[in-house]
Amino acid sequence: MSGSMKSVFERYNKLKEEHHHLMNPVSEEKFWQTEAASLRQQLQYLQECHSRQLMGEELTGLGIKELQNLENQLEMSLKGVRMKKDQILTSEIKELRQKGNLIHQDNVELYQKMDQIQKENAELQKKVYGSRSTGEENAASNPSFMVRNGYDLHAPIGLQLSQPQTQYSESSAKVMKLGLQLH
């Protein structure tokens, strides 16, 4: 039992003795309300004092043993904070790697689609150029081969996908300018 609670019961017993065991419920309730309010204030003060001590303030009244206990407590708290921070960083790195893998997978699929489109484009050009040599006479006589705006249906279709290029840096631009000045 803590010293505060011990002193509360001592005061209660003393009060009972003073009233010769004839305390009525109202005065008893009032006593406990007052004691509860006092204990709440003490608890608040201790919490504030403890918080300040954890911040390295108000250490004047503490001896070596109390300071050692406080230091141990702070080291344990710091260890817990660092462990939590490491857990968060590890999970964030894992998440970023997963996102990176997904983006890489999407990139691979896009290049595969691009390659497929280029192959289809090459096949279309072969078909168009192959049929043009035999059907050139028909194209002149048959108006269905002409589009209304005048473009030839047999004209080669050029579908091109360009790969993303990195912009040249300012230093390479300067080199180009210097090269031009030398000529």
Image (spheres, rainbow, N blue to C red):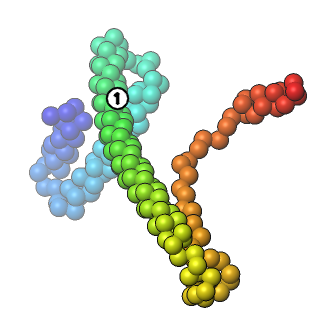
Decide: is 24 above or below 51: below
Q: Nearer the viewer, residue 85 or 28?
A: 85
Quadrant where the C terminus sits is top right
The answer to whether residue 110 is visible is no
Q: Is residue 71 left or right of residue 128?
A: left
Number of numbered discs overlaid on the protein picture: 1
Q: Nearer the viewer, residue 116 or 45?
A: 116
Q: Is residue 116 left or right of residue 138?
A: left
Residue type at mark 1?
A: Arg
Decide: is 66 above or below 93: above
The answer to whether residue 138 is visible is yes
- Where residue 28 sits, quadrant-wise, is bottom left
Picture coordinates of residue 47, whole percent (x, y)? 36, 37
Q: Secondary structure at mark 1?
A: helix
Residue with the mark numbered 1: 82
Q: Nearer the viewer, residue 119 or 30?
A: 119
Decide: is 123 above or below 13: below
Picture coordinates of residue 53, whole percent (x, y)? 41, 26
